[in-house]
Image: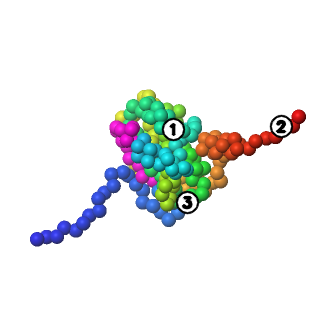
């Protein structure tokens, strides 16, 4: 009897091997079809009751509740790039870096597939329930749709380089819905005395 040696199963998503200098780990795959309720259950519902464990946002704002998330998915009609980006550094500023990392990913994705950024929509789930905070980023195209997204090693190399640069920069507090939301809540707590 010949004994077969155990072989580790291959991960179906494309992944660039991590380098010592990398500030994030990226995993991505393309989904031709998504079960949106399942996505919400996995990425939002299981953490929604734990304060500060999940933040959901898109290019405009922080998304506050489950119905807003489901409404966002109503406009998905083509393939979806599903990325998981684990932030290996800057955990204390994960909220602040998450949006910038997502924007860089979208920029690289648009360049690679020759799509105008205005024709892209996304939703991102920042999870802080693990040792390293991570973002589940789902990107899709508004009309017209490409039948297939091109993702290759050059894309990963470029994206990793861009994310490393973003993580090294000081946090940009302008045009960041995650920061705007936090600042808004801080000012709500402050009551100004009225002088007469």
Q: Is residue 161 left or right of residue 79?
A: right
Label 3 crowd (10 A; few <14 / some 14-19 / many >=20): some
Q: Is residue 190 left or right of residue 157?
A: right
Judged from the image, the secondary structure of the residue bearing numbered disc 3 is loop
**Is 69 above or below relative to 96?**
above
Label 1 crowd (10 A; few <14 / some 14-19 / many >=20): few
Q: Specify the label residue 194 is tagged with.
A: 2
Q: Specify the label residue 100 is tagged with.
A: none
Q: Quadrant of the N terminus?
A: bottom left
Q: Specify the label residue 65 is tagged with.
A: 1
Residue 61 in the image: state x and y as whole percent.
58, 38
Q: CA distance from mark 1 to mark 2?
A: 35 Å
Q: CA distance from mark 1 to mark 3?
A: 28 Å
Residue 116 in the image: state x and y as whole percent.
50, 34
Q: Nearer the viewer, mark 2 or mark 3?
A: 2
Residue 128 in sight here: yes
Q: Nearer the viewer, mark 1 or mark 2?
A: 2
Residue placed at 31% from the left, 57% from the top? Answer: 10
* Mark 2 / mark 3, whichever is N-terminal: 3
* Mark 1 / mark 2, whichever is N-terminal: 1
Judged from the image, the secondary structure of the residue bearing numbered disc 2 is loop
* Mark 1 / mark 3, whichever is N-terminal: 1
Judged from the image, the secondary structure of the residue bearing numbered disc 1 is loop
Look at mark 3 in the image and give the residue it sits on. Answer: 89
Q: Is 27 inside the magenta-drawn segment?
A: yes
Q: Which residues are magenta?
A: 26-39
């Amino acid at each position: 009897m010949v004994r077969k040696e155990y072989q580790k199963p291959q991960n179906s998503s494309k992944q660039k091997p991590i380098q010592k200098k990398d500030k994030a780990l990226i995993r991505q795959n393309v989904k031709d079809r998504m079960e949106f309720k399942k996505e919400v259950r996995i990425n939002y519902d299981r953490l929604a009751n734990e304060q500060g464990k999940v933040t959901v946002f898109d290019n405009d704002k922080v998304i506050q509740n489950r119905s807003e998330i489901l409404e966002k998915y109503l406009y998905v009609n083509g393939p979806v790039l599903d990325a998981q980006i684990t932030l290996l550094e800057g955990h204390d500023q994960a909220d602040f870096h998450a949006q910038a990392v997502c924007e860089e990913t979208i920029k690289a994705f648009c360049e690679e597939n020759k799509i105008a950024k205005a024709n892209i929509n996304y939703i991102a789930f920042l999870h802080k329930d693990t040792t390293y905070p991570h973002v589940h980023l789902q990107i899709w195209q508004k009309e017209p749709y490409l039948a297939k997204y091109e993702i290759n090693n050059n894309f990963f190399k470029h994206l990793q380089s861009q994310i490393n640069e973003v993580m090294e920069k000081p946090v940009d507090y302008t045009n960041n819905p995650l920061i705007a939301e936090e600042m808004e809540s801080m000012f709500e707590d402050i009551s100004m005395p009225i002088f007469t």
